[in-house]
Image (cartoon, rainbow, N blue to C red):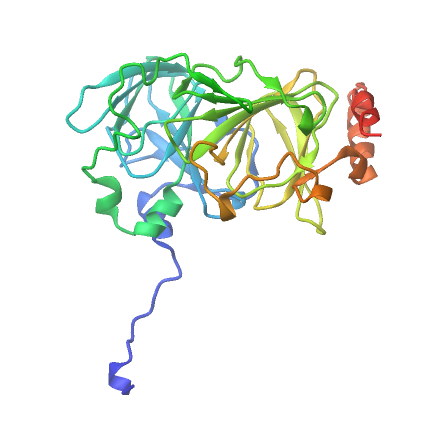
Amino acid sequence: MPESEVSQAVFSDLTSYDKWLEEEGLPVIRGFHITDLKDVAVAPWRRKGGAGTYVNLDGTGGTNDAYVVEIPPGGNLKPEKYLFEEVIFVLSGRGATTIWNEGGKKQNFEWQAGSLFSPPLNAWRQHFNGQGDQPARLLAVTTAPLVINLFHNRELIFHNPMVLKDRYAGEPDYFSSSGKAHPGRVWESNFIPDVASFKLQDMLRRGAGGTSINFELANNTMCAHISEFPVGTYKKAHRHAAGAHIVLISGEGYSILWKDGQTKTRVDWHTGSLFVPPDMWFHQHFNVGREPARYLAVRWGSQKFRVSGVLSMAGVEDSVKAGGNQIEYEDEDPEIRRIFEAELAKRGAESKMAPFFSKQR
């Protein structure tokens, strides 16, 4: 090829999502975990109104992201719609959200601290703070990185006129129905009033007398689950795909995370903490507090609309000895138990794990 025909263009190392993130003009929190989501600093957010910050922790692997947005007392955010999924957890405050399709009737529902919901894909949404004396703070987990990098077309993503009736067709009970139970600890609903009080089901295969429920939300490919385990216990280690945003709802403890064959990392947590285990890193959760530990995980892994490959959550309840991704108690490093018992001793507490170890023999 003649030298005159060789392109002199220099392509950026930034992805389309990276460029968009820079243009948002917000702080971006990176790293491994956040000690308390209620304490993170926020800055004025021109696109949304209110104030916010992005939360792009290392464990997402670029498959999804999160942000914290704060609505001023008695205020509201701007109306928006876009072509990526979004699951919202209310960190503090109370208020209401209006949802509508282009040209359709508006629908309102109220939320409070602990509520979980998902605005339907490409439907209009607007959030309002119902309190006049303090801000409301929301955490949202979205599929924006994948969608923006895939299409790299802002007009398509943020100004697409298509009404996706398979996601939302204006059903009057979309955010008010009682929900529907499915086999396998699955609850299908578009609005959970309070994740802290939601009744869970036994999850014996994950160990330590734990309970859990999986949520299918707004016909998404992302989903969520709540897990809880008793005082003085810990769960079996397991691993799965990247992008599971784990928010502590109650309790005090720590988690150990590691890539097979490498050094372990410890994350201490309490109510309001957030961390994201990296892709196929084992992680194990330990309750050393005075109350049951409950957490919310917003993640890939919908059972209704499955995504395979790098976003799969398969095998998380099956032993590694059988080709799965869970380490049974009898196969774990003995140091795991020793550290746990030492942590309890510091607090004058005792381990409640003996019955669960004996079941493994």
Q: Percent from the top left, x then y, of residue 238? A: 66, 38
Question: Is residue 266 visible to us here?
Answer: no
Tell which of 273 and 246 is nearer to you: 246
What residue do we see at 85% from left, 30% from top?
361
Question: Is residue 218 visible to us here?
Answer: yes
In-image side of 338 versus 256 (left or right): right
In-image side of 200 versus 116 (left or right): right
Q: Percent from the top left, x then y, of residue 268? A: 65, 32
Please identify the quarter of the rendering in which residue 15 is found.
bottom left
Q: Residue furthest bottom?
A: 2
Tell which of 323 and 157 is nearer to you: 323
Q: Percent from the top left, x then y, of residue 224? A: 49, 29
Q: Percent from the top left, x then y, of residue 119? A: 33, 27
What residue do we see at 68% from left, 28% from top?
205
In-image side of 57 versus 323 (left or right): left
In-image side of 353 versus 160 (left or right): right
Please identify the quarter of the rendering in which residue 315 is found.
top right
What residue do we see at 46% from left, 33% from top?
302
Q: Give the answer, above or below, for where 114 lies relative to 280.
A: above
